[in-house]
Image (cartoon, grey):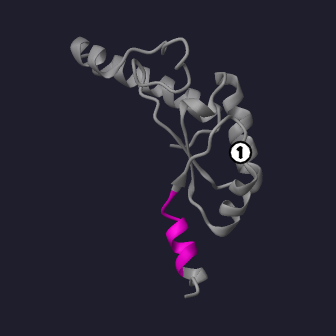
Amino acid sequence: MATDPGLRRLALRTLLAAFPGPTPPDWAAKLLADGLAGFLLFSSNIDRPERVAATTAALRAHRADVLIAIDEEGGDVTRLAHATGSPYPGNAALGAVDDLALTQEIYRAIGDELAQLGVSL
């Protein structure tokens, strides 16, 4: 049974893929050309935080609108600083302090850092 290319493209537009290591593999370009929504980065993709910008740029070289996601929440939930620990407080600490302005400031800083590295989600 042949695969309907239109259906495949629609399905790919709903998916985020992952790959090991800091360098996108050759198949990433093919899937992006075929319509893949984007990639989810994990700590295995980040040998050092400053390298993330090179990884995201390599993906964007294949398609500028690629969605690049990462689970970066501060505290224990960090991919960028998995080797050293996050410089940002986590959710529990922010909840205990119960300061909305501080929470907004922290998450704005995390968002700004991710945006500078080319992460979109």
Above or below, 29 relative to 71: below
Residue assigned mark 1: 24
- Please state if 57 lies on the left or on the right of 104 as rendered: right
Tell me the quarter of the image containing the N terminus: bottom right
For image coordinates 71% across by 45% down, the residue present is: 24
Task: Work out whether residue 39 or residue 97 is closer to the camera in this orientation and state it.
Answer: 39
Can residue 63 be seen?
no
* Residue 3 x, y percent position in the rendering: 57, 82
For image coordinates 62% across by 34% down, the residue present is: 45
For image coordinates 58% across by 27% down, the residue present is: 113
| Magenta stretch: helix, strand or loop mostly | helix
> SS at mark 1?
loop
* Residue 121 x, y percent position in the rendering: 50, 43
Task: Work out whether residue 111 or residue 59 is closer to the camera in this orientation and state it.
Answer: 59
* Residue 55 x, y percent position in the rendering: 70, 38
Give the residue furthest to the front: 1
Q: Quadrant of residue 48?
A: top right
- Please state if 8 lies on the left or on the right of 88 as rendered: right
Neighbour tally class for label 1: few under 14, some 14-19, many 20 plus, Cα within 10 Å: some
Q: Is residue 101 magenta?
A: no
Above or below, 63 relative to 77: below
Above or below, 62 relative to 43: below
Q: Is residue 12 magenta?
A: yes
Above or below, 96 relative to 25: above
Q: Quadrant of residue 102?
A: top left
* Residue 29 x, y percent position in the rendering: 73, 57
The amino acid marked with disc number 1 is: Pro
Which span of residues is magenta-colored? 7-15
For image coordinates 30% across by 17% down, the residue present is: 94
How many marks on residues?
1
Give the residue furthest to the bottom: 1
Can residue 16 be seen?
yes
